Image (spheres, rainbow, N blue to C red):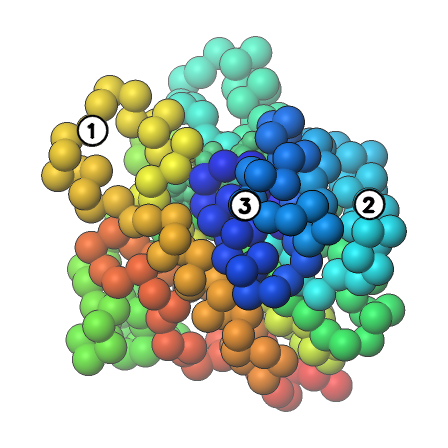
Amino acid sequence: MTGGAVGIGNAYAQALLTAGWQVSVCDLREAVEDPATFNSEPDRVLGTIADVSDPADVARVIDNTMSGFGRIDALVNNAGVWRETNPTDSLPKTLDDFGAVVGTNLYGEFLFGRAVIPRMIEQGSGGDIVNIATDHMVTCGTPWDVCPRGPQCPFDRAASGFQGPPRPTGGGGSMDLYDISKWALNGLTYAWAKALRPHNIRVNAICMGATDSHMLRGFHNHAPSPEEEASWMKTSDAAEMLMDLLAEGPSGRTGQAMNACIGRPCKLEPAHTQLYVRDEDIA
Ligand SMILES: NC(=O)c1ccc[n+]([C@@H]2O[C@H](COP(=O)([O-])OP(=O)(O)OC[C@H]3O[C@@H](n4cnc5c(N)ncnc54)[C@H](O)[C@@H]3O)[C@@H](O)[C@H]2O)c1
């Protein structure tokens, strides 16, 4: 688990611990080293201070995990940052923001995947990789008449309880770096899902919408209205969604990006037709 000292990742870690997992968590925050951060006994949780965008830190987290628990059955690529960015920003600001936002949200997830995948393959018992993305990336904007999902698109399933109006792509004019970092996760999720299917490693993305966390509180430092706050999803619901996904086991979905958008149930949406990973793709 990456980025679990606070926020959604902390709820994920606590839910995994409650379900009986041993959990290795890394974070920039020192609190990650304290089992009390996870309401856990020390022998079930292993915290490492680390920056997911630093290859040496990633290697250290993996080494700690292997020497502490001996194996890795799931990777939850959760650590993420948001900064206000604009196409008109100065070059120094842009370069600094690019390093922080793309470095954490994309390069960090990439590095962790690259570090964990060989171990999962070597273990030979499959596993799960879950990339935490954003709801900005799910509405692809494809016109209905050419959308390969057609009526199965999660935005057009009136009977499923997940219906809702299509949202515009992207998070707005001041999120270009955040959005490119999260959109690129589509590529990792789908490519890894396809490549790792023969090894029984499932790779999916959960695309979170506004969820009450440190990140969102920082984003809303203008003080949100009570109505706006009430609309936010809860980290505990997000954690339940993750646990439902993991509970599907080896025969569950892979190569899918699931939504959790405000105004709709924060629940694991039904699996949809495999678009990116098909049986015939596997030699
Ligand atoms: N909260 C939302 O509304 C929302 C919406 C969409 C997507 N997300 C995504 O959900 C994930 C969790 O977000 P959150 O809202 O819980 O954020 P948060 O800021 O509350 O928590 C993120 C955690 O990641 C850690 N972290 C940040 N950069 C790191 C790095 N380089 N190395 C290691 N740890 C690092 C932070 O210290 C923090 O503990 C992120 O990927 C975020 O982009 C959140």
Q: Residue at x 82, y 51 (%)?
A: 68
Picture disc at residue 64 = 2
User: Pointer 1: what residue?
Assistant: 224
Q: Residues within 10 Å of mark 2 (few under 14, many from 20)?
A: some
Q: Is mark 3 within 8 Å of ligand 1?
A: no
Figure quadrant of residue 97: top right
Q: Is residue 8 left or right of residue 68?
A: left
Q: Is residue 141 visible?
A: no
Q: From the image, tell me which residue sits under label 3.
A: 39
Marks 2,3: beta carbons within 8 A = no
- Which secondary structure, mark 3? loop
Residue type at numbered disc 2: Asn
Q: Amino acid at mark 1?
A: Pro
Say which amino acid is labelled 3. Answer: Asn
Q: Is residue 236 above or below residue 218?
A: below
Element assignment for label 1 = loop
Q: Which mark is in front, 3 or 1? A: 3
